[in-house]
């Protein structure tokens, strides 16, 4: 290979290797941030979200409704962490095949730096609802926020139709 061409090839390879190294650094930094957020979400889930859900659930149980809290984790990939409160309404006819009397409120680790809130209400109440209720930083998840988000969903379910 001619010296000039060899020099050009060397320059091309150096630029490529620098770009590759920078890309790897960015990827590793992002992975590190995602791992840290996953750990933070699990801490918030255990210390803030679950206790708030239990408090609301116990209040509902005292009024004849049932609740269950379930958690999902994917330790291997550090994704798909979630906590869901299922509220079964007392006094509402139900079927073994349809969740007509079940309200769901979930807090999930999404992306690499946010917590999404999802909700689903029975379709027999008003028009029913299933969908997002907001995205928050882990630092924004407080007992008050968790309670308010659950209460917003319950307001839709228990309020009289207009």
Image: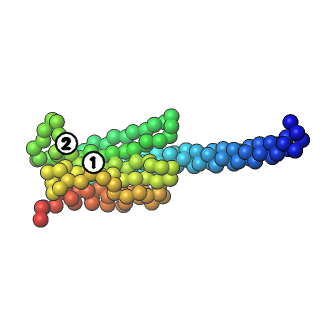
Residue lying farthest right? 3
Q: Position of residue 65 (x, y in %)?
A: 18, 47
Q: Residues within 10 Å of mark 2 (few under 14, many from 20)?
A: some
**Residue at coordinates 85% horizontally, 40% vertically from top-left?**
6
**Mark 1 or 2 closer to N-term?**
2
Q: Real-space Cα distance between discs 1 and 2?
A: 10 Å
Q: How is the image coloured?
A: rainbow
User: What residue did someone put label 1 on?
Assistant: 104
User: What residue did someone put label 2 on?
Assistant: 99
Q: Position of residue 62 (x, y in %)?
A: 19, 50
Q: In the rendered picture of this protein, how many numbered marks are placed on residues?
A: 2
In the foreground, 15 or 56: 15
The N terminus lies in quadrant: top right
Report the side of 87 relative to 73 (left or right).
left
Helix, strand or loop status at disc 2:
loop
Q: Is residue 51 among the parts visible in the rendering?
A: no
Place residue 84 in its image quadrant.
top left
Relative to 156, residue 15 above or below: above
Report the side of 23 relative to 109 (left or right).
right
**Residue at coordinates 48% horizontally, 49% vertically from top-left?**
111
Helix, strand or loop status at disc 1:
strand
Q: Position of residue 47 (x, y in %)?
A: 43, 49
Q: Is residue 153 among the parts visible in the rendering?
A: yes
Q: Position of residue 103 (x, y in %)?
A: 23, 48
């Amino acid at each position: 290979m001619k010296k000039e061409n060899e020099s050009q090839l060397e320059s091309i390879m150096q630029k490529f290797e620098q770009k590759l190294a920078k890309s790897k650094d960015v990827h590793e930094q992002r992975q590190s941030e995602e791992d840290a957020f996953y750990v933070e979400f699990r801490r918030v889930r255990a210390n803030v979200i679950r206790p708030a859900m239990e408090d609301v659930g116990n209040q509902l149980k005292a009024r004849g409704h049932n609740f269950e809290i379930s958690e999902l984790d994917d330790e291997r990939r550090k994704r798909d962490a979630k906590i869901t409160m299922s509220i079964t309404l007392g006094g509402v006819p139900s079927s073994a095949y349809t969740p007509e009397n079940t309200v769901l409120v979930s807090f999930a680790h999404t992306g690499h730096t946010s917590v999404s809130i999802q909700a689903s209400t029975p379709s027999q109440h008003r028009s029913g609802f299933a969908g997002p209720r907001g995205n928050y930083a882990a630092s924004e998840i407080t007992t008050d926020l968790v309670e308010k988000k659950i209460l917003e969903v319950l307001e839709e379910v228990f309020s009289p139709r207009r």
